[in-house]
Image (spheres, helix red, strand yellow):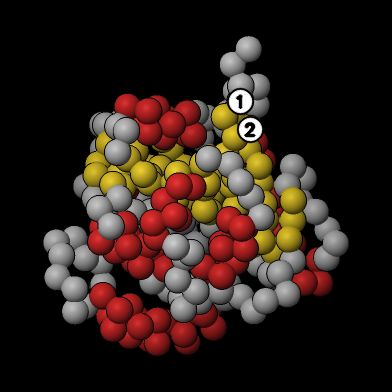
Amino acid sequence: MKSKTEIDVIILSFAQNEELKLITQHCINSLMASEDQEIIKFNVVVMESQQEMKPFQYKNTTTIYPEEAFGYHRYMNIGVDITSSKYVCLCNNDLHFHPGWATEILKSFHKYYDLSSASPFCSFHHPKMGFEQDNGIYPGYRSRYEVAGWCLFLKRDIFRLTGKLDENYQFWCADNDYANTLAALKLRHALISSSIVDHLDSCTLDQQAEEAAIAASEFFYLEKKWNHRKMAGWTCV
């Protein structure tokens, strides 16, 4: 019997109210319904920032309430450290997974042996950026183009080369730094246009306007880290 493919899915959540809690649960529900669980097993870890919910566990997940102060990369690193599958998917909570999305990415990994990282196609966002659905793969490192920071699917092995995600980013610019790191190390990334995961327009962030206060310092750090390096496709802005 062919063994299941296991994928560790790490989802960040900040369920400050019932509406945001439902957004996270919808994300999980659509994920679990998206693939045949006899073929693909999702090991779902939710990093929940709303400490008052503890010890609540979202259905079909291990829900963690970190004691550390929030940081997008910090929380993702915790999730990576407590999981062990060959494949890892780093996710926002405001996503809707369409049937077969993971299968399509796995097909691309098997077809293109040097592909280390991928993002699925958002049917709301990517057509506006000039991409066509079901039109093959689009290699590249541009944030919000080929690199959809709200959903990054990667081979765990790349962390042996990249090290942990840079925890200097609390929220903003995390995807830019990820993209630049892959480009610097020549680790190939692509947008998979047959894998559909819709991003529901930052539902959580819209209700957390205070996050904007930290943006300036994170853009400054990104520029300081990368602008002296010259490479096509750099995503410092």
Residue 163 makes an appearance in the image: yes
Q: Which residue type does callout 1 highlight?
A: Lys
Looking at the image, the residue that sits furthest to the right is: 55
Judge whether 6 appears above or below 18 on screen: above
Q: Residue at x 25, y 53 (%)?
A: 186
The answer to whether residue 9 is left or right of residue 133 is: right
Q: Dot 2 corresponds to which residue?
A: 41
Q: Is residue 9 left or right of residue 60?
A: left
Q: Position of residue 228 (x, y in %)?
A: 19, 79
Distance from disc 2 to disc 1, alpha carbons, whole Å, reads 6 Å
Mark 2 or 1, which is nearer the eye? Answer: 1
Q: Is residue 121 left or right of residue 81?
A: left
Q: Are marks 2 and 1 in contact (CB under 8 Å)?
A: yes
Residue drawn at 41 percent across, 34 percent down: 105
User: Where is mark 1, residue-wise?
Assistant: 4
80 w.r.t. 217: above or below:
above
From what the image shows, is residue 155 above or below residue 112? below
Q: Quadrant of residue 29?
A: top right
Residue 113 lies, in percent from the top left, at: 32, 33
Tell me the amino acid under the disc marked 2. Lys
Q: Quadrant of residue 142?
A: bottom left
Give whichever of 177, 192 is nearer the camera: 177
Q: Earlier in the sequence, mark 2 or mark 1?
A: 1
Q: Quadrant of the N terminus?
A: top right
Residue 17 visible, this angle: no
Q: Position of residue 117 (x, y in %)?
A: 38, 46
Closest to the observer, 136 or 109: 109
Dot 2: few (<14), some (14–19), or many (≥20) neighbours within 10 Å?
some
